[in-house]
Image (cartoon, rainbow, N blue to C red):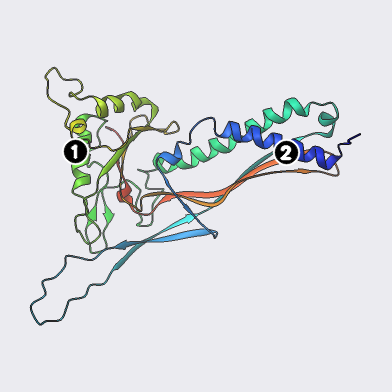
Amino acid sequence: MAVMNRNTFAKDLEEGLNAHFGMAYRARPDEWSMIFDTEGSDRAFEEEVLEAGFGAALVKPEGSAVGFDEGMQGWTSRYVHETIALAFAITEEAIEDNLYQRLGPKYSKALARAMKHTKEIKGAAILNNAFAATAPGGDGVSLLNTAHPLLNGGTMSNKLATPADLSEQAIEDLLIQIRKATDDRQVPISLMAEKLVVPPELEYDSIRLTRSTMRVGTADNDISAIVSKGVFSRDPTTITRLTDPDAWFILTDCPEGLKHMRRVAMKRGMQGDFDTGNMRYKARERYSFGWTDPRGIYGSEGAV
């Protein structure tokens, strides 16, 4: 006759909890992954230096030496990883009374939702604080600002100078700003818009503005330049946990924009406690959110 000892029981219980955790965690797509690029990390924090390219190439007269240029290093952005963890326990008495079959799946699903919710909050916080002077980046100003300092002097802007609500005209104004973007040596970089990012309150407006072939809200038959030109390569993204109902954003193809640094991927584990007899189940991961180059996102806080 087969006998299940405590170790076998714990292993089987852990496998079941892992399965329920995974199903609950994957039940909805990650919103943060739709706006952040993920990179790996192997230390407590990462520092990224914004690199400025070369200036214009020089004319080399016949027989003369070739000219040289030196790269310029800009501001340093620091990504400090946080440890996010939570656990629950199933008491020895609940195990004795066979309640673990009901409590285990319930608790593990709740734990998965809690871990997912926290990560979404952390990601959304970057945009929720994008206009706040209290949340500066490596260059000393907020993520969305009209006065990002350039290495060779001057400033650049990645927000509308006059805040405006989401509209066809406001989008076009910001797209022109994106098209005219330069690097820190003020060399045009042919930056391209990728998609709108909006709160739930602007979800349906964003769809109308980016999919309607005719101009939204007009009686004429003018085409929508935004749609006919195919400005956005991806559909709008709605971030549920954005707190400002009027703020809206445009992600660009800037390669060093918004980033999610993964230090330790999600780990789950279970352990018995000798003193209480309880079985404890834990989830844990380490990561950070931030940005290196503010040209990765443009936006407006809406009309004020």
Which of disc 2 and disc 1 is earlier in sequence?
2
Q: Which of the two discs, 1 and 2, sits closer to the camera?
A: 2
122 relative to 93, above or below: below
Residue 177 image offset from top left, x and y in percent: 20, 44
Quarter of the image with the C terminus in it: top left
Residue 63 image offset from top left, x and y in percent: 10, 82
- Mark 1 is surrounded, within 10 Å at the Cα level, by few (under 14), some (14 to 19) or many (20 or more) other residues, namely few
Q: Which disc number belongs to residue 207?
A: none
* Residue on which disc 1 sits: 173
Circle 2: residue type: Glu
94 relative to 143, above or below: above
* Residue on which disc 2 sits: 14
Residue 79 image offset from top left, x and y in percent: 47, 55
Q: CA distance from mark 1 to mark 2?
A: 55 Å
Q: Is residue 33 visible?
A: yes
Residue 87 image offset from top left, x and y in percent: 68, 40
Judging depth in this view, the residue of 144 and 47 nearest the camera is: 47
- Mark 2 is surrounded, within 10 Å at the Cα level, by few (under 14), some (14 to 19) or many (20 or more) other residues, namely many
What residue is shown at x 29% (from left), y 41% (from top)? Answer: 194
